[in-house]
Image: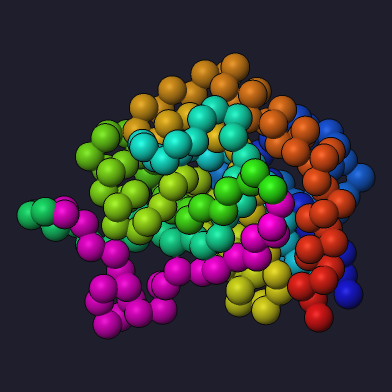
Amino acid sequence: MAPPTIVVASELEWQALSPLHGLKHLVTGVGMPAVYRSFLNSGIVGPLISIGIAGAYQDMKLGIGDVVFVGSEVVGDLGMELPDHPNFSPLWDFPFGASHVKVDLLAPVISCVPVVNGCTVSTVTGTQATGSRRRDMFGASIETMEGYAVADIANARGVRCIQIRAISNVAAERDMQPTNIRCALDALSTFWMQHGNDIMEAIDEAKD
């Protein structure tokens, strides 16, 4: 079986994740379209490990630098804007969008690492109202811009996918301080040094 490919959104993230260097990897660019484009002609086969930073929704008890596994992904802003509450309806609520459903991921059991639901968006959350709606509508704890696309590609190919994220900001506040991003990336590096072998073994065992 092919070894797993590490998938990151940006060169900044990859350069900061030095404990993973030497592993097969793909830098996709930011956002779901960039992820799909990157895989079109990549020739990548085998399992995927998506790793990077994320925003946490309010009241999820997640702080800067906390590391999580993502157990499922949805697209949080693909749908219809509505004039009345809740002001948005996901595409899967309509017959022509029934295929846009939640995608499940492999989440290894590692002590003290929570498994959360992810919400992937093309327009990042900028208000408390939008953050609360996405959190409550999808049961999501975190928000990214690429997670669903990687999970969707893995699902379509019938391969395993693990997503690991570290919190760099509160989604609605958009407080993207460089120190917070560095804290999140350092947490991912430390986490991989401690548990990278466990993750690789979980991927390997899940192939059977």
- Residue farthest toward the left in the current orientation of the protein: 84
Name which quarter of the figure residue 162 lies in: bottom right
Q: Which of the image's four quarters has the C terminus?
A: bottom right
**Where in the figure is residue 154, as x and y percent of width and height?**
65, 69
Can residue 188 be seen here? The reply is yes
Note whether 122 is above or below 67 in the view shown. below
**Where in the figure is residue 61, as x and y percent of width and height?**
45, 36
Name which quarter of the figure residue 44 lies in: bottom right
111 left or right of 121?
A: right
Q: Residue at x 49, y 36 (%)?
A: 62
Type of colouring: rainbow
170 left or right of 151?
A: left
Can residue 143 be seen here? The reply is no
Task: Tell me if residue 102 is in the magenta stretch.
Answer: yes
Viewer-side residue, 145 vs 39? 145
Q: Residue at x 87, y 41 (%)?
A: 21
**Where in the figure is residue 90, as x and y percent of width and height?**
29, 64
Name which quarter of the figure residue 184 lies in: top right
**What residue range appears in magenta?**
86-110
**Where in the figure is residue 92, as x and y percent of width and height?**
32, 73
Viewer-side residue, 83 vs 195? 195
Note whether 116 is above or below 124 in the view shown. below
- Residue farthest toward the right in the current orientation of the protein: 22
Q: Residue at x 35, y 79 (%)?
A: 98
